[in-house]
Image (spheres, grey):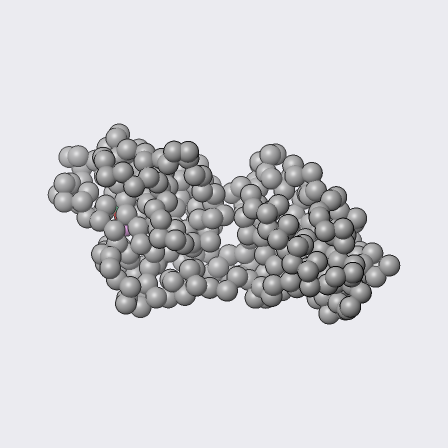
Amino acid sequence: MDDAESDQRLEHRRSPNVPVTVEELRELGVLYWKLDADLCQTDGSLERICNERGYKNRDEVFCEPGKLPDYENKIKTFYREHLHEDEEIRLILGGTGFFDVRGKSDEWIRVKVTRGDLLVLPAGIYHRFTMDSNDCTHAMRLFKEAPRWVAINRPADENQVRQEYVNAFIAAPRRTDLGVVVEGVNELVNLPHRFDEDIARIIKRAHEAHRGAKVFLIAHFTGVKSDVTGTSWCSDCTRTEPFILPVVQQVLDSNSETRSGIYVACPVERTSYKNNASYLYRVHDNVRIRCIPSVLLYDVTAGSLSGPVWRFDDIGEDLDWARAMDEMRSHVES
Ligand code: KMT
Ligand code: NI
C-alpha cells in the first residue's frame, strides 16, 4: 500500500499497483482460503480446516457503528500496529475490510477481505485492521484455545513469539522437497510469477560452475505442504513423492565433471491452481502441466530453457513407477 497519511478506510493502492499473490502471503505465514459463506459451516469445508489446524472455538464480531461496544476506541486499537501471541483467524461473513500485514522488507501489504474469505495471520506478525468506507465487517473469529484478544503493540521485537515468527518466516532458510536449498544443486521456485526469472538465474549459475558439462534441470510441480501436518493438500503428490525423490537424489548424486543435474521444486498453491485454467504453470509454453504432480526434465546445456525433453505426469494408481523413473534416469544418462 502507499504511505499516504489520508483516511485509513481508503484503498491506499500504490500507483502503479503492486499486486501480491497468495503464494507471497504464504511466505509470510499468512494463509488464505476462499470458502462459500452460505455452505462452509454445513458442507464440512470449514470443519476440515479447523480439524487440521486445531481451531476449537469460535465467536462472531460485528465491526459496525452501534453494534461494536466502545466502537471508536476499538477501531483505533485495531488499527494500531500490533501482534498477537496466537494466530488471528478471521472468516468474513459479511461486509468488507482491510487487514494490513508487514512484508519481508517491513512494507505494508493491504489485504482486502470480503464475504467467504478465511484469513489466518500467524502469531507474531505485525499487522492492523480497518473497515473500509462501508464501515461494516462481520467476522467469525476462530481460536485454538478459549477466545481471547490480547494485542501487543509495536515495538515488540524482544517478544519471544515475535522472535519465533522472525526466525520461521523472515530469516528462515528456504526448503525444497529434498531439504534445505543448496544453491546449484536443489532449488526452490516459490512464486509462479517469478518462474522465468528464477530459472534463468539457476541456469546461469549452473553454467558458470560447470563449463562444458551437460546440464539437466528436473522441475517437480507438487502441491504445497501444510506447515502443521507436513503433508501436501494434493494426495497424488503425497502418494508419488516416495518414488520421485529417491530417483532425483540418485541423479544428483551422480553429478560429475561432464554432467550436472539440478532439482527445482515448484510448489503449487491450492487456491491459485484449483479450477483455474489460466494458472501460470498450465499455460506457460515451457511448462504446460496437465496435473500435479508433474516432473519435467529439461536439457539446459544450451544455457536457456526450452520445452522439456521428457515429462512425467501419469499418476494412475497402477503405474509402474520404477520403470517411469528408470526412464528419467536413462534420459539423463544417455
Ligand atoms: C485485530 O486483531 O485487529 C482484530 O481482531 C480486528 C477485528 S476482526 C474483523
Ligand atoms: Ni490483530
Looking at this rendering, what residue extends furthest in the top direction?
A: 134
Query: Which quarter shows the C terminus?
Result: bottom right
In which quadrant will I find the N terminus?
A: top left
Q: Nearer the viewer, residue 145 or 80?
A: 80
Name the residue furthest right.
334
In the image, residue 324 above or below residue 79: below
Q: Residue at x 45, y 42 (%)?
A: 20
State the image quarter where residue 273 is shown: top right
Q: Residue at x 23, y 39 (%)?
A: 5
Q: Nearer the viewer, residue 165 or 240?
A: 165
Q: How many marks?
A: 0
Q: Is residue 46 left or right of residue 61?
A: right
Residue 305 in the image, given as x and y percentages of width and height: 71, 47
| Residue 12 visible in the snapshot | yes
The spot of residue 10 in percent (x, y) is 28, 33
Classify 274 as above or below 159. Answer: above
Question: Image quarter for residue 278?
Answer: top right
Where's residue 72, x and y in %? Answer: 14, 40
Question: Residue drawn at (17%, 34%), measured in percent from left and top?
Answer: 65
Q: Is residue 270 above or below residue 145?
A: above
Residue at image position (80%, 65%) is 258
- Kindly tell me whether residue 90 is visible in this rendering: no
Query: Is residue 227 left or right of 252 when viewed as pictured?
Result: left
User: Residue 327: x, y in percent?
Assistant: 83, 56
Q: Give left or right: position of 291 versus 320.
A: left
| Residue placed most toward the observer, 27 or 40 | 27
